[in-house]
Amino acid sequence: MKNSVLMLMVFSIALLSSSFANAQYEPSMQMGLPDGAIARFSKGVISKIEYTADGSQVAVTTSIGVWLHDAQTGKELDLIKEKYSNSNALFSPDHKRYVTYANPIRYVQLWNSQNSKHINTLTGHKEKINTVEFSLDSKTIATASDDKTIRLWDALTGNFLMVLTGHTEPVYAVNFSPDGETIASGSADNTIRLWNMHTGKLIKTFTEAEHPIEFSPDGDVLLGTSRNPRQLQMLNVITGELIKTLYWTNLVSSAAFSADSNVIAAGDIDGTIGLWDATTGQTIKSFKAHSDTVLDVVFSPDGKTLATAGQDDTMRWWDIHTAENIKTFSEYLDGRSYMKYSPDGKTIAIIRHDQIWLRDATTGKHVKTFKGHTQYIMGIGFSASGDTIATGSADKTARLWNAQTGESIRTLTGHTDTVYTPVFSPDGNQLVTHCNDNVLRLWDLNTGKNIVTYQNEKQRVTFTFSPDSRILAIATEAGEVMLWNTNTGKKIRTFVGHSHYVHPPLFSSNENTIVTHSRDRSVRLWNVHTGKNINTLNIMGTVNAVLHAPDGDLIAITSHEETVSMWNVETGQLLKEFEGHKKRDIDVGRLFSLGKKQRRRFGAPSEHIRIARYSPNGKSVTTVRNNNKVQMWDISTGKRIGKLINPPKGDPSDDLTVTGIVYSPDGNTLATVQLGNLGGTVRLWDTSTGKLLKTLKGYTYCGNSLKFSPDSKTIATGHWDGTVLLWDIP
């Protein structure tokens, strides 16, 4: 009895603790979360916005589902989640059904939105599907494909109805007329075609336009874009004649009719909205609505308000008569969900186009916004102290920011191309910026002066700071390795010997030795002070990676020839070989005079090793083979830790490629990332036993964008739908 009471108390405390932790997050951050996730940052990528029939709510279709907003207050009411990850989700107008599809897929999944039950799989297209649309009465689905056809389906059952053929190139767009009698299709053959939905017969072909956008509410007029995308064509559906051409100053990206068919609204790639009188074709007004492309426009049922979605991550509502911005809702992202924890783990920095958003890593609340760049930000770097943030941008500048206040400290100019992720020196006094034109610059952050500029337009370069920040090592595609004094900006010496691309060099902890590995299949050890080549390790087979142990002067070398070998940096001595080393590949005895005990071989030969990672404490190493099997090893004994890590049997991701392995800072947890064409799976493993702790599912394709918090208690995963999810570590 006592044990039962004790267990109940423990469970209650754990439940209360979990509830309290989750209660810190805003309600919208916890709507429709996958099992096990704590919170979501941002709301996905907008693809469509629409009012409900009574105008009381606005439904925003995004890459993660449909958000329902109160049309008066803008409050998030609900998130209707899509069933499949990495999919486009489209709901029927009555919201009783929805479909999911993901390029380059040839089929569509149909679901019941009330209970999320799968209804049917729509198959038949021979090439990828480009678009899917519901009829306004929610009874029919149209799919358009690269196979030059349109297929019609019963939206209640998913049964195939008919195929429309006639286009001579891929079909990219379909639209239903309001009465459901006619379908308009647009194709790369530069025509719009009208079809009878019941018989499938071709009614008319328009050669003046190629992309149908929308029917007028009365169904008499079809709005389309021509081969000159700065024009809108008003086409008479009855007679087939061109009624009017509406001219615009930029590329039109979206358009819509008002409910009474009297006004046309169009958005362009510059973020501007234009309004026209649909009867006369005269421009009523234009106004700047977004700072980037307008993705969608829709009139409210009463015609008084216009809702717009932009690639600037916002949805906005406008008064039609005054062009006044009534409300703005942000955090709809564009899919570039790169994020980085601050060194103390208290905040997460997330790229949002030309801005950086800082969020509290505990509550998820937005802390501050860094503004100043005029184009996309390509990367974020934190100084070791966490006090300063550096950003690189497509606007050809790097900027330094005060991480506490959000103020811009300094702008580093003079770059001639896109600046990638800036890198701080370990002491935080220097910064390296690297551009798309292969120009590398070293900056003194105290003065803002450019100390070193290394330019090699025809060759890629890599670089590394020494642990004490006094030396910058730059390696080139031609095989040269140069050392620069970071205080004076003078070149110290050049190492010559490699004949091919050199990966980022590695310094030994005492900075006496530098290790370089190249595509010429060699690993070289150099004396930093004399420039002499201490040893050359001629690895047979392509070297995948050279990894430096965190707590000592050991390096691990992995190659395509099924080997992981451990070496002493200072002496070049081979210490151990892991997993399937073949003597015919490397004549170890000729390289170093070692006893058999020092040349231990662990494990049986299998497939070659693609990835290897040290644990943070340097006591273990994890390897990934070409057959996607993951193994952890104890460095001191050479023995396996746990069994080979494989996905559970029957898991859909069994055949996916393991593309990344990441240790938590405390070394107790290992994350493996498995990716395929349709998505990805992240699994968390106990590094002491190899036991599976948790599988993170229920989200879209995440690439290798994941970060552990510095305290190793949470993990953040960034996704292609523009969101970041936070998860607890078991």
Image (cartoon, grey):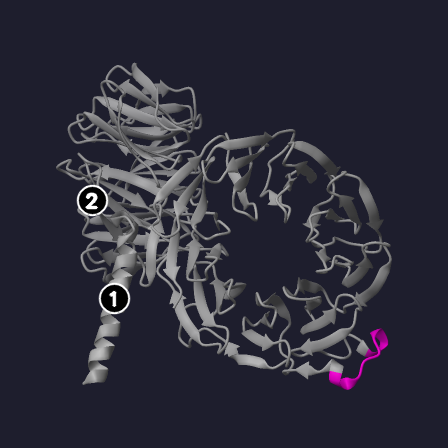
The answer to whether mark 1 and mark 2 are in CB contact below 8 A is no
Taking the image as shown, residue 249 lies to the left or right of residue 132, namely right
* Number of numbered labels in the structure image: 2
As drawn, 6 above or below 263: below
**Residue at position x 42%, y 36% in the image:** 369
Residue most extreme to the left = 54
Mark 1 lies on a secondary structure that is helix
Front: mark 1 or 2? 1
Looking at the rendering, the stretch of residues picked out in magenta corresponds to: 589-597
**Residue at position x 26%, y 54% in the image:** 23
Q: Position of residue 5 (x, y in %)?
A: 20, 79
As drawn, 550 above or below 57: below
Crowd class of label 2 (few under 14; some 14 to 19; many from 20; radius 10 Å):
some
Residue most extreme to the front = 2
Front residue of 50 and 682: 682
Crowd class of label 1 (few under 14; some 14 to 19; many from 20; radius 10 Å):
few
Using the rendered view, name the quadrant where residue 248 is placed. Answer: top left
Q: Quadrant of the C terminus?
A: bottom left
Residue kind at label 2, given as amino acid type: Pro
**Residue on which the image places disc 1:** 15
Taking the image as shown, residue 562 lies to the left or right of residue 4, namely right
**Residue on which the image places disc 2:** 93
Residue 145 is covered by the magenta coloring: no
Residue 594 is covered by the magenta coloring: yes
